[in-house]
Amino acid sequence: MKKIFAAGILVVLTLSLAAVYFQALPITNQPLKQNKTLVIGTINLVRTDNFVKDYYMGIFSACFILDPLARIDASGKVIPYLVNWSTNDSRVWRLNLIANAKWHDGKPVTAEDIAFTIMYLKEKDPNYAVHFQFVNSAVALDNRTVEVTLTKEWTAFIVGLAATRLIPKHVWFNVTDPSAYTGNNRNIGCGPFIYQGFDSASGTMTFIANKDYWKGKPNVDKVILKFYTTTDAMLMALKKGEIATTYAYAKGIDPIYVPSLLGDKNITIMVYPNFGVDNSLWFNCKRYPYNITEFRIAISYALDYGDYLNYIAAGYGEIPTRGWIPNCWDYYVIKPKLSKNSSYAEQLLSSLGFFDRNGDGWRDYPNGTSMIMKIIARSDIAESLRLAELVKRDLEKIGIRVQITPVDVSTFQTLTQRTKDFDAAISRTTFWGMMMYAGAGTLYFDHRNMGWANVDDPEYIAIVDEILRTANQTRVKQLYERIQDLYAERMYVIPLYWGKIIQPYRSDLVEGISYEPMYGILGRDTWYSIK
Amino acid sequence: MNKMEIIGISIISCIIFMALLSFGIGSIIDFPKSKQYSPPSIQNPLGTDDLGDDILELLIIGSRTSLLVGFLGALFSTIIGTIIGALSGFFRGVLDDVLGVIIDVFLVIPALPLMIVLAAYLSPSFWNIVIVIGLLWWPTTARLVRARAWQLKSAPFIESLLALGASKTYIVFKHVLPNVLGIASARFILSVSHAILIEAGLSFIGLGDPTNPSWGTMLHFAMTRGALLYGAWWTFIPPGLAISITSLAFIILGMGLEQRQKLSTRSMEDII
Amino acid sequence: MKSFKKSSFFLKILRYGFTIFIIISINFILPRMMPGDPLVFLFGEEVYGAAIRNPQLLQSLSEKYGLDKSLSEQFLIYIGNIINGDFGQSFSFGRSVAEIIAERIPLTLMLTIPSTILSLFIGTLLGLSLGFNSNSHLKRSVSSFLIALHSIPSYWFAMLLLLVFSLWLNLTPTGGAPPKDANIISILHHIALPFSLLTILNIAYISIIIRGLTMEIAEEPFVMTARSKGLSWIKLRIRHLLLPSLAPFLSLAAMELGFAFSGALLVEIAFSWPGIGYTMWQAVVERDYPLLQGAFTAVSLIVVLANAIADVLSYIFDPRIRMGENE
């Protein structure tokens, strides 16, 4: 009797669970090609649909809703888009509106909007305070011409144009705090898609094709962005055909996932060059002993670059050269490849006076005190912590004691950009970061700017200053070559591996995706090449 | 010794042996590195993780952190709980009221969320995790010890001591504490089980100490570096099993000890 | 002999009020106890970074949050804000914490309430059965199995379920909540795994406790007598076991809801189920302290409330407590 009772309970339990499972059989998706809706999965979570306040909303609004003034082509050059430009002295610039663009509410785009956007964003948005730091004034001369006056000669001004997301003056002119603006017209732009809505609970954002877009209607009618909190969940959805492709700003998927996608015949994997440096070891070049060039060079010989490539990038990438700049840039100069030579590293360190003085097995400072190198890594990026772990092992093999400190993104920024209270850090750079300031990664090096590496080497600073005021492109290229010499000779930063952008998509759902270095597959070309 | 205790002790001995073995890695035993996510093979009996590290090696290294955090966290929480419980149970009046309310309050506040909050404020390190567990896992122990101290208070020998004019503090430390040691040790063993589970939970959500990898850390990296989608079950089944078995072993041993203390069966509620 | 004070039911309820006060105080003290400027935790590193370079801004922020006032005054301001439902602004979401929490709580309730009801039902039956004649071989092994089940970390169990049901059998999604306009099938599809896991774990917990209660009562003489009179086992259970334990049962039910609520935390994280537990995790990852505190306060309040309800129910259903004879 009792046994029957117990068995009965087990049956009830099993049946109730089974009932839930069987009712929950997967729903088959309609082919996306038929209704011309493209569903894209992303782990770049949008929290609120205000593009000034929310970083990723800013990215997606640039991809869909707002048009840039200039664009960046596949080779990384700035080319005209809404405007073209001319200047005689690199101080006074004329921008000519060349597109017949209309805002989503039907009003025409004018030079007034352009002048307003430049001055408004410079004042209200901290990012543009950097892009337009030398802008003194922007005035509309007529309906199609804007005159921008800079405080000094500055050739990289046009790079800022490529980052500028044109906003309508008639919406924003009396909004004092754009990051708090909640008006219904907050997402009006003149881009290829019209913003439809954001459902934060289920994590979807919808865009409808703009029939009146000045370059013509996009090839899809509707784009749905689906937000995923984990890559696992996103790629499962890709495998099941719930999404047609994935997106991550300035990034592909973590290469470690590639093998789990390779078996699926409907999934195609595209591999693109990465213009950013996928992970480097950044030294605080103003702090002892990392301010010693030979010390940094010694460390560069202690690292096993093959391991980083295999275990972190899953083989999708290359062992970098000492020149740091990835080989996809047109100004890239061939430099010797980084390689491990532990005995040379140890010999160099010992000759600098860094050897074990108290017999504990670890190298000490020349003055006898014990040395610990603290490496900070982002706690929210698993690859970053894993890479730090591998670097730690390599350094410990040559007797340098290492402590990894995982930090969240905002602490990382505070430590590397403001307080400069760190020994070394692990982080990647983005294409856009490489373009900014004087280009060639100077943004990340120069202690006067964001300057993670905190470089104040006068020779380096002189080159940066010359690039900033040089209009002659041949000369700039020469300077970029010179800067790579410095990167290789002085090792301010050690590139750990050059990654690739890995972009999977379902060939049964979408074809003809284009790629550009800045916004990846969500660049303007995709909307006209897609099938 | 009853059967439960024997089972518990033998499993725990194995785990302690594992933890001791971890000191010999590199000298006595060596585990070869391999390709990432290699399935179990002769070379790597439990396969490898995303860094190509041998899972068995990590399991052995992890046992050290998991056990140590478990023991130390449980030790702290038991000491705090026993002292608060003994004092509260033995003294009448204001002290008991105050301590009693504190015990009740901390029994109600959900411990795991509070630990997460505390751990997020403190930087992730071995000792911080021990402290977090120690500070927040004492209320149940305090309640049980308090009940026992209550009983003791009316025991004839204590009453005669009181009648002889012995100071209460003296009695608490000389006679009450030794008499609650039995229940405190049972609670200690059960707390080890909880502390191991809590440490694993905190590490799993990324609040663990990255320089002292534990079983929870292994689960964290399996979860965040795609082991699931890869189907690399060997990266997360062994550490999860290790956590479960270890915590179960301590529960079994603790239950055995509690039975010895002739506690009512209702204390099952407190075990869990 | 118990003093009136100790057995007073109302004093007990008063204690819950005190507990809430303690929880709020913890939230107030923690950011101020940590080394460094509490502004960092109150505003996030970014705003703080801007503030330290701009003394004027720092001053205005201090004034706005009353940091230039004494600690006791600050505390009153803080309490006032909480009473008005103002938990501050989340750094990472850029929205009010109260708003985010209000959005996430229903998702947690959707998971915990049905799971609690089902597991109470099954767990009680199972526990009653196991507690009676508890020495049978089968029952002992089932009990051991339940205890073993309880020492399994829930998030690890979740990973196993995902591996089997999501990856190998492709029956369920790998996590996440159903969309707002989802139909019932889609909701079940998403909720199946987290719901089953939570229910299984709760059943284990409840049945172990009910088993303990039953074992105690089963040893009492009146049950023995009833048994010898040949009362059928089901009648016996209901009349002599279930009815007298109605009060502890109801209070168990209410407490169980609280337990499920905080226990659902790790389950939610493992399944990316965007309830309150998952929100806490997001706040941890981004070190979004206002959101973390808000989520913690919400979880604690619900647990405290569940406990208070448990006491009220015991008070109503158990005359012994009303007479002040408990303890």
Image (tube, grey):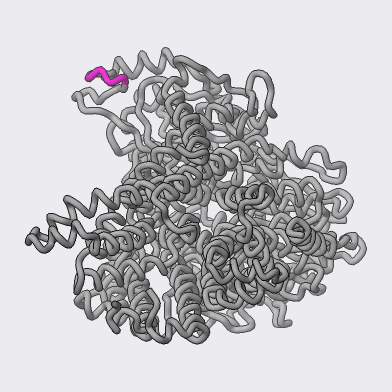
Q: Which residues are magenta?
A: A357-361
Dividing the image into 4 quarters, which one contains the N terminus of chain C? bottom left
Say above or below: A368 vs C294: above
Q: Would residue C12 be found to the left or right of residue C161 on screen?
A: left
Quadrant that contains the C terminus of chain C: bottom left
**Residue appearing at x 66%, y 38% in the figure:** A256
Q: Residue furthest front?
A: C229
Q: Is residue A428 visible?
A: no
Q: Is residue C170 above or below residue A257?
A: below
Was residue C150 drawn as part of the magenta stretch in this picture? no
Q: Which residue is at 39% across, 60% downward? A: B140
Please indicate whether residue A73 sits to the left or right of residue A138 in the image.
right
The residue most toward the right is: A34
User: Can you see residue C289?
Assistant: yes
Which of A320/B42 is in front?
B42
In the rendered image, residue A360 lying in the magenta stretch gets the answer yes
Report the residue at 61% width, 51% height from top: C135
Prevalent SS, magenta region: loop
- Using the image, determine if residue B236 lies above or below residue A298: below
Image x and y of residue B154, in percent:
24, 64
Q: Within the image, what quadrant is residue C261 found in?
A: bottom right
**A411 or A14, nearer to the observer:** A14
Name the residue located 42 percent from the left edge and 45 percent from the top edge. Answer: B257
Nearer to us in this view, A232 or B142: B142
Q: Position of residue C41 (x, y in %)?
A: 36, 64
**How many dots with numbers?**
0
The residue lying furthest to the left in this view is B165
Q: Nearer the viewer, residue C256 or A146?
A: C256
**Residue A240 position in % (x across, y down):** 82, 53
Residue A183 screen position, x and y as percent: 59, 83
Q: Which corner quadrant of the image does residue A358 belong to?
A: top left
